[in-house]
Image (cartoon, grey):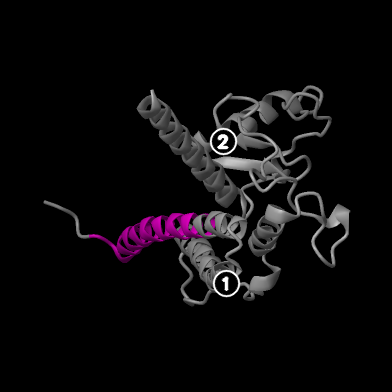
């Protein structure tokens, strides 16, 4: 005879279901932001400033939605860990979309289409966020596993040197080496030290990984078209 579910069990099942749906929504919003950015770059190359402006406005509308969904995810995880009988959640203050790091990257990506070697108006050279509109990541494979960052199950980034790792691999690496002599970053030539508290999945990491994946897919598709064109010409 099946045991009736307790209130705590029912809450746990409900939260798990909500988290699954919310994580899917987060992935969709991340993908939408990346797609908006890449289309804006293409339109800027064609000097379609009117349409770039529309995408600019769309990004500003989508950024607060993205932040709200991420805050909801954090709230669900918090409830899952410990049910709060008062049913009160402290929400972070809403961010200003224009100050969001993704929006700054969006503006710079469009600017660099025609001004690749110039700082954006009103910004000093050292304040530029991106080094390339093609990829914002300092490494594209995990220094420990060798897996492409687009295939990592649980990516984290060092706040010290910005190198990206598979979380389990780097945590195991730190546990083994930290007891002996401290743990240096495993990326070739990087002098920074690794500590567990400075390895995080920051708000932009998964968006940047999604962008790398989409740009790679686009390049592959363009190459296939080029190859087919050459075959037709022959």
125, 46: nearer the viewer: 46
Residue at left offset 38%, top offset 25%: 231
Where is mark 1, residue-wise? 50
- Magenta span: 5-34
In the image, residue 156 sits, relative to residue 67, either above or below, namely: above
Numbered badge on residue 185: none
Q: Quarter holding the C terminus?
A: top left
Q: Is residue 17 left or right of residue 3?
A: right
Residue at left offset 19%, top offset 55%: 3
33, 100: nearer the viewer: 33
**Most common SS among magenta residues:** helix
User: Which numbered disc flags the more N-terminal residue, 2 or 1?
Assistant: 1
Residue at left offset 55%, top offset 47%: 211
In the image, residue 18 sits, relative to residue 147, either above or below, namely: below
In the image, residue 226 sits, relative to residue 102, either above or below, namely: above
Q: Is residue 134 left or right of residue 221?
A: right
Residue 50, horizontal then vertical, whole percent: 57, 72
Mark 2 vs mark 1, foreground winner is 1
Q: Is residue 60 left or right of residue 109?
A: left
Residue at left offset 56%, top offset 35%: 149
Where is mark 2, residue-wise? 149
Q: The residue tagged with tag 2: helix, strand or loop?
A: helix
In the image, residue 151 sits, relative to residue 131, either above or below, namely: above
- Calculate the distance from the C-alpha at mark 2 to the C-alpha at mark 1: 35 Å
60, 100: nearer the viewer: 60
Residue 167, horizontal then vertical, whole percent: 59, 37
């Amino acid at each position: 005879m099946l045991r009736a579910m307790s209130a705590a069990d029912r809450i746990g099942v409900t939260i798990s279901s909500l988290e699954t749906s919310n994580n899917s929504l987060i992935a969709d919003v991340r993908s939408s932001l990346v797609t908006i950015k890449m289309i804006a770059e293409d339109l800027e190359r064609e000097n379609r400033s009117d349409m770039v402006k529309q995408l600019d406005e769309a990004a500003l509308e989508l950024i607060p939605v993205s932040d709200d969904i991420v805050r909801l995810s954090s709230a669900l995880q918090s409830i899952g860990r410990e049910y709060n009988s008062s049913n009160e959640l402290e929400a972070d203050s809403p961010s200003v979309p224009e100050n969001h790091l993704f929006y700054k990257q969006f503006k710079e990506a469009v600017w660099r289409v025609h001004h690749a070697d110039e700082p954006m108006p009103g910004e000093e050279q050292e304040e530029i966020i991106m080094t390339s509109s093609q990829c914002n990541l300092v490494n594209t494979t995990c220094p420990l596993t060798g897996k492409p960052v687009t295939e990592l199950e649980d990516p984290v980034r060092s706040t010290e040197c910005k190198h990206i790792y598979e979380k389990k691999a780097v945590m195991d690496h730190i546990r083994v080496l930290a007891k002996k002599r401290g743990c240096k970053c495993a990326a070739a030539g990087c002098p920074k030290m690794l500590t567990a508290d400075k390895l995080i999945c920051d708000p932009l990491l998964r968006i940047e990984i999604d962008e790398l994946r989409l740009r790679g897919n686009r390049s592959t598709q363009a190459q296939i078209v080029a190859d087919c064109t050459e075959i037709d010409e022959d």
